[in-house]
Image (cartoon, grey):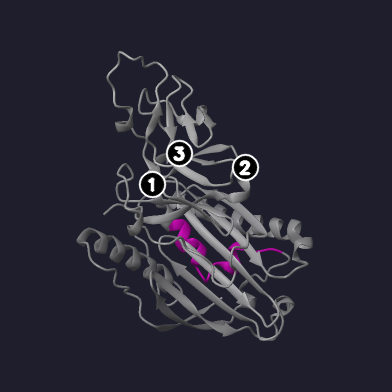
Amino acid sequence: MTTLLRNCWYVALPGKDLKPGKMVHKKMLGEPVLVGRHEDGEVFAMRNICPHRGIPLQYGWMEGKDVCCCYHGWKFSSEDGHCREIPSLTEYDDLDISRIRVPTYPCREVQGNIWVYFAEDSKKELDPTTIPPVPTIPDFGKVSPGISETIDFACHIDHAIIGLMDPAHGPYVHSSWWWRSGPRKFRVKEKQYEPVPLGFRLVPYEMPVSARPYKILGNKVSIEIVFELPSVRTEILRGDRYSACLLTTITPIDETQCIAFQSIYWTIPWMGLFKPLLSLLTRKFLAQDRDVVIQQQEGLAYDPPLMLIDDADTQAKWYFRLKQEYQKAQAENRPFQNPVEPRILRWRS
């Protein structure tokens, strides 16, 4: 089995970072990808290599909905990748340019993020009816995030995912004056989990009265946390007045690097006033998670045996089981069977 899941959607970048008429190049799942936005706002993604002489298409330019290579001017449709023009050809050349193609990727902008779909074989044309829908956050419609932050993790995606979902690291990794930290604050947590189509979720429960910051959402604030393959985690807070959501997704660059995207959504009309502070805190949290994972790599370089314990590491165990079942189902061409069963998890943090 490969270690990077395919037949999945991954975030390429926040929508705000790609202006009309512009293109950016990315390395995703080890592949060179060119992501662009037409003047009408539509986004596209294609392989970032010209099939003629191998130069990256990022050095070229856009003409309408075509991408032109900077080396010899070859022109490719950004919609299906087919070659539309080779300037050097004459009427004496017998070449069917329609047979020349740059592979393209399904690309969608949803709720403020640009997603790219990676099939098992990215070089083959896909049947659109076989592509699953882009992950979305329920109850937030077409709203864009109030805050979008990205950060690179110099590790395999697996370590980034289980590090971010780890429920017991908070008091040690996220130590700050504005965050509860240290073992003296420990208490037993008891949460109910259940399976969802491609993962598991923390069954919604009402936040305790002592959780004062959540009062801005109103009374009876509930929290729901959902994780689904390949790497999508949503934490949704719902009050009787407002709602908020933290969306975290991780996209593998290759087998040794990945990038985390974190978006915060809210329905609070005046929350925009606090964007600078929220951006600062979000970056600080992500940097603390990244720094400890980088430190972890020093030990992992020696390939030590690792231990995952119950119940604090059960979510990590579920992730690996989900990933293994997903790959087996794909290889055997059968429906995915979620191995997670409803369970109460208990840990101290």
Label 3 or label 1, whichever lies nearer to me, is 3
The image's mark for residue 255 is: 1
- Side of 91 where 261 appears, left or right: right
Q: Is residue 181 magenta?
A: no
Residue of label 3: 78
Image quadrant where one finds the C terminus:
bottom right
Disc 2 marks a residue whose amino acid type is: Lys
- Name the element at disc 3: loop
Please tell me which residue is depicted at 46% across the width and 60% down the height of the picture.
Answer: 134
Q: Magenta residues, as a range?
A: 159-176
Q: Position of residue 296 (x, y in %)?
A: 47, 54
- Side of 74 where 285 appears, left or right: right
Q: Residues within 10 Å of mark 3 (few under 14, many from 20)?
A: many
Residue of label 2: 19
User: How many numbered badges does the structure rendering display?
Assistant: 3
Please tell me which residue is depicted at 52% across the width and 71% down the height of the picture.
Answer: 167
Image quadrant where one finds the N terminus:
bottom left
User: Looking at this view, is 328 or 314 the one in front?
Assistant: 328
